[in-house]
Amino acid sequence: MDSGFLEIDPGLDPEAAALDWLIGKAALADADVAHAETLKQGSSRALLIILNQMGVLSDDALAEAYAKVTGLGISAGPFVPPSEPAHSLNPEFLRDTQALLLGENGPLAVVNPLDERLLRGIEFALGTLPELTIIRAGDWARAFVRFYPSEPLLITNATDEDDAFAVEIADQERDAPIVRQVAAWLGEAADFGASDVHFDARRSSLDVRYRIDGVLQAVAREPKAVSASVVSRIKVIADLDLGERNRSQDGRATIVVRGRRLDVRVSIIPTIDGESAVVRLLDRPENLLSLEGLGFSGEVASALEAVCNRRHGMFVVAGPTGSGKTTTLYSCLERLKGRGLKILSVEDPVEYHFDHVSQVQISEKAGRDFAGALRSFLRHDPDVILVGEIRDSETAQVAVQASLSGHLVLATLHAIDTARVRTRLVDMGVEPFKLDACLVASMAQRLVRLLCTNCRMPAPVTEDQARLFETHGLTAPDSIWRADGCPACRNEGYRGRTALAEFAHQGAQPDRTQTLMAQGLQLVEHGETSLAEIVGLGEA
């Protein structure tokens, strides 16, 4: 590379050096690199960028690798736009090259500082090359949509023949305003790590909201006139009936967001103000977190590993809707891959598809319910059975019977804590002696938001707060952290979530691990979350 851009040893291939460094850190698998090399054929994108867009190379690892070979720093924000955003720079060029000019006179924040096309283009447009800094890919995407709201981040097409089934979100229709706007919303939501995108029909508007870290955040309020067109575009994506406007519809599809494949689940319902839609964004199974990456304590992670190694019995994960129960069980299924087991699941709905699992979708129309599916499973020679949710007495009793007959049964249940798992199952008609024989463990789980480390603020501990710590056997700290808000966290004060789990081992009176509230208070003490965030865990 021309030394006028960066001071790099001319005898060094910096891209290869960065790749070798990542492989040496075990941040990449050989199979992923081989797949990326296939995708790179005929592409101008760097190999590391492709790996990042595949979802196998994290934003942090990518930035760290480029920093290692260039000596550049990594910008943590806040990211301030220039007073004149255009600044002689084409937004489309910046979008394609993943770059942004920050502040009044730079620096130039780049995802890939080795992109010669980017550097020469910037130098040509400005007459000089500004100081460079590295920006994480996710931070760049979030900043770009703030800097250039009229330049949507389009969802790109599949990049190889294996992705031919993927919905072409940005296709030959990309110039159509509605198509472009829906693509921009879905792309932005994926960049923000949103789990759902809500399109809510109101009397005089269409409200667009993202669910980020479990909280709905308003994004846009569009004129009522575009509501029907937006919902129609979503129906096209999910292959739903465009002419049906008087009944609910559900569908699914696969989209590709800058090389990262996502399964989406679409729900359409008619309201008095028109049709409303919710698009759930689901990582594909290969992108699911491992048991180690879910955020559980070492004790809980070891206990989950022990459950996966069992050949029979029942394991129940409890918690309210949206607490991550299904994700935990899916991670268990991933751990069971390659063990030569027959794995069956019955779910409503099936959120993730697994190649090594035979999955059954509940269908009232077809007369297929949880209990009926479980009874048929017992004639299908299974080793492991996943029950998406124990909802009624019949399902509970068939699940217990399956575990007693030599199968490992993984199930979810709506309950506050582990102590109430047993109570709820007994209330559903399961005999206590059968539970004693089959219930090997239960776990209650919650998700709590993590404080944004860029803007969290210290606050003194009040007397009432100190008593809360003492009630749970902890010594109150002198101060704790609270949420504030900054551009990096969209002024929410929180970025990301972690899991809390209470694990109860086998026995009629299980010996419970540390309670959810006690774990939450420890996170507060360490400055990872706020007291306001964990108070809602309160034990009844």
Image (tube, rainbow, N blue to C red):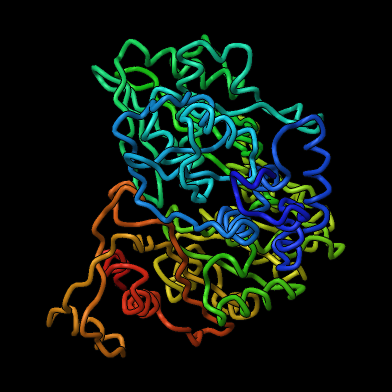
Q: Is residue 521 in view?
A: yes
Toward the viewer: 395 or 162? 162
Q: Residue furthest right?
A: 340
Counting from the top left corner in percent of width and height, residue 73 is at 50, 58
Residue at x 59%, y 33% (from the top left corner): 120
Figure quadrant of the N terminus: top right
Counting from the top left corner in percent of width and height, residue 312 is at 74, 72
351 w.r.t. 200: above or below: below
117 displayed left or right of 175: right
Residue at x 52%, y 9% (from the top left corner): 243
Quadrant hosting residue 170 = top right
Q: Is residue 194 in view?
A: no
Residue at x 42%, y 56% (from the top left corner): 76
Toward the viewer: 446 or 291? 291
Toward the viewer: 363 or 495? 495
Quadrant hosting residue 201 = top left
Figure quadrant of the C terminus: bottom left
